[in-house]
């Protein structure tokens, strides 16, 4: 299950990622945190374009550390540094530029570059969540 597209969509809704999955609104995050005496949830396993994304007024952070997911997303990755006072500071990991291609490309290199494409054909990757629109989504970490 995943958070809804923004903080204005509350409750549970069907998730386009598949049957039996839902999207949950910020109200569900707040209720869960209160019931379990938590201040913050950090979740992973969903590609977000900037490597991390805040939701539910900062009570939920989606963290994704892999850059250029499946060789196609061109997304940044991120890590979270937790300070002594439990202050969380995100650090971005930008994707590397594509390697220089030359006519003398070795067979090993071709194999290294095509195995991921072949894997993606067999099992498509999870869809990437787009970048939040800063003028519309004030919960974006761009405002930290």
Image: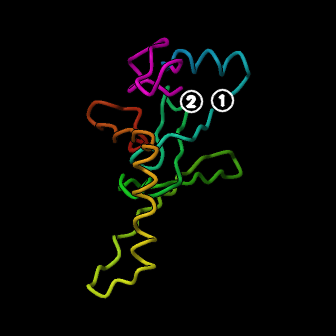
Front one among 115 and 77: 115
Left of 58 or right of it: where is 94?
left
Left of 99 or right of it: where is 39?
right
Q: Quadrant of the N terminus?
A: top right
In the image, which residues are magenta?
Answer: 1-21
According to the picture, the residue beneath numbered tag 2 turns out to be: 59
Labels 1 and 2 touching (C-beta < 8 A)? yes
Q: Name the element at disc 1.
A: loop
**Dot 2: within a 10 Å radius of its alpha carbon, few (fewer than 14), some, or many (20 or more) residues?**
some
Instruction: Please name the residue shown 53% across and 18% down the image.
Output: 20
Q: How is the image coloured?
A: rainbow
Q: Residue 12: within the magenta?
A: yes
Left of 109 or right of it: where is 79?
right
Question: Is residue 124 depicted above or below 19 in this figure?
Answer: below
Q: Name the element at disc 2.
A: loop
Residue 119: x and y in percent read 46, 53
Q: Quadrant of the C terminus?
A: top left
Q: Main secondary structure of the magenta part?
A: loop
Instruction: Please name the residue shown 33% across and 70% down the image.
Output: 98
Residue 26: x and y in percent read 50, 20
Q: Residue 65: within the magenta?
A: no
According to the picture, the residue beneath numbered tag 1 turns out to be: 39
Residue 50: x and y in percent read 41, 49
Instruction: Please name the residue shown 34% across and 37% down the image.
Output: 132
Left of 57 or right of it: where is 73?
left
**Dot 1: within a 10 Å radius of its alpha carbon, few (fewer than 14), some, or many (20 or more) residues?**
few
Residue 44: x and y in percent read 57, 41
Residue 16, numbered circle: none
């Amino acid at each position: 299950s995943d958070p809804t597209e923004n903080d204005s969509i509350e409750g549970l809704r069907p998730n386009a990622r598949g049957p039996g999955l839902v999207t949950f609104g910020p109200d569900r995050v707040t209720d869960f945190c209160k019931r379990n005496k938590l201040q913050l949830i950090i979740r992973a396993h969903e590609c977000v374009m900037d490597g991390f994304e805040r939701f539910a007024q900062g009570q939920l952070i989606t963290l994704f550390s892999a850059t250029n997911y499946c060789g196609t997303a061109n997304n940044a990755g991120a890590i979270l540094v937790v300070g002594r006072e439990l202050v969380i500071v995100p650090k971005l990991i930008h994707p590397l530029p594509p390697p220089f291609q030359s006519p003398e490309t070795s067979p090993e290199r071709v194999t290294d570059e095509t195995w991921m494409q072949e894997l993606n054909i067999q099992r498509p990757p999870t869809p990437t969540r787009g970048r939040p629109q800063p003028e519309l989504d004030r919960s974006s970490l761009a405002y930290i």
